[in-house]
Image (cartoon, grey):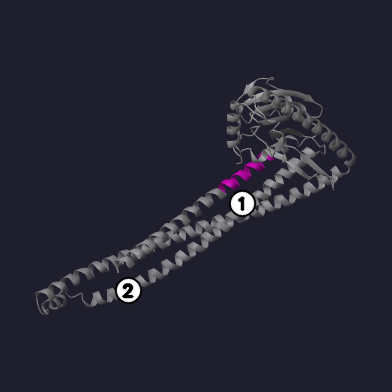
Amino acid sequence: MLKIRSSFIIIYLLLALISGSVDAFSQISMSTLKKRKEQNEKDIAYTNTLINKTIKNKKVSLGRLNLLNQRIRSRQALIISIESEVSHIGKQIRQKNKDIEKLENELAKLKTQYAKVIIYAHKQRNSYEKLMFLLSSKDFNQAYKRYKYLQQFSEYSRNQGKSIGNKKESLAAKVVELNKVKKEKEELLSQKNQENLKLSEEKSQQTALVQKLKKRERQLRDDLRKQKRYSQKLQKEIQKVIERQALLAKKSSNSSGKYAITPEDKTLSLSFDKNKGKLPWPTKTGFISEKFGEHPHPVLKHVTVRNDGVNITTDAQSECRSVFKGEVTHILSMPGLNNVVIIRHGEFFSVYSNLASVNVKKGDVVQSKEKIGVVYTDNSQDQTVLKFQLWKGSTKLNPALWLYRN
């Protein structure tokens, strides 16, 4: 019997722990949702700032389309965040309604029991009757038991009254919580409707801008061909740099293998590798306006764009920073890419293209977040874009997977 009882106690405790964990998870989840929503709102505000800076310029450009596309993405993300919050609050409302229903049932039972107690107490209110109840006992033991019963009954009556009062207070508090949550849900639904209206308006602007850009298809294709030539030339230069660094490392370490590295480089490489997903952004502010790999052109149909890194759109005069400790191995000046800085981090290389000016020189050892230049602003395209690449040996990496994600 003791073993069975112990098992029941263990099961009860486990259920309590699970219940507590669910509540904690629910709170964490809601907190996460709110943070995500706040970040979405910040992203929209930031994009609005960039758009407002170019609003006086009436020129149609890919830069403006990129900004508009980013705002639309951020708006869609915000709407999804709001919907998630609404869904979460819906679950809270259902649970609170269940809690209220349970409290109401418990209160009704208490009131019924208390009514019976009051009726009985009313019948036994006469002190003479209580005395006779005690005196009519068969012996002293029975009289004592009856006396204790009267005491317990009196205590029970008082406790029942207190329980009813406590239940009423709990019920009132739950009703207040429910109304508060319902109001929060109504506000979120109102915000969602407003955001949907803004999204619809922005999509109309996007469609109109794309139509205008399509009229300049020949120029867009020419620009794309030029950018492709610039990118190919940069890739060849990067490959040369990597080959040269590998050769130097091989001679220094007297090791076999194409990409032999020194012990110091290996330590730096391991440190760099451990920071995947944690690297600071090469600009203080900005967003990825063109992702890694192949993807459709934003305007031209059936045209694929290839990016060996990511494009980060940022503020005018934005500083470019090193993403990790390393040595500046090369500084290049290239058509269409302005200035390019290549930094080696052991067997890893970070490449920063489209810099208006450079603040470092070849051979400098830079630290994480150290300024290495200023990003170039293309006024004709209404954009300030840093072209950022990451390599491990001769392998191109997706920088988005290595940079810190909010």
In the image shown, does 268 or 25 lie closer to the viewer?
A: 268
Residue 60 location (% of width, % of height): 82, 39
| Residue type, numbered disc 2 | Gln
Secondary structure, mark 1, is helix
Q: Residue at x 67, y 27 (%)?
A: 343
How far apart are labels 1 and 2 at the CA level?
48 Å
Q: Magenta region's main secondary structure?
A: helix
Residue at 61% over, 53% down: 82
- The magenta segment is 34-47
- Return the residue nearer the eye: 220 or 2: 2
Q: Is residue 41 magenta?
A: yes
Which residue is nearer to you in this view: 92 or 250? 250
The residue carrying mark 1 is 81
| Residue identifier under label 2 | 113
The residue positioned farthest toward the left in the image shown: 140
- The kind of residue tagged 1 is Ser
Q: Which mark's residue is nearer the viewer, 1 or 2? A: 1
Return the x and y of residue 17 as percentages of the image width and height: 42, 57
User: Can residue 380 be seen by looking at this rendering?
Assistant: no
Residue 10, by quadrant, is bottom left
| Depicted 263 relative to depicted 40: above or below | above
Mark closer to the chain start, 1 or 2: 1
Q: Position of residue 63 (x, y in %)?
A: 77, 38
* Label 2: which secondary element: helix
Q: In this view, does 144 lie above or below 248?
A: below
User: Whole-percent x and y of residue 141?
Assistant: 11, 74
Q: Can residue 143 be seen in this view?
A: yes
Graded by Cα atoms within 10 Å as few (under 14), some (14 to 19) or many (20 or more), the crowding at tag 2 reads few
Q: Is 361 rendered above or below residue 36?
A: above
Identified at 49% across, 62% down, the residue is 95
Left or right: 265 in relation to 7: right
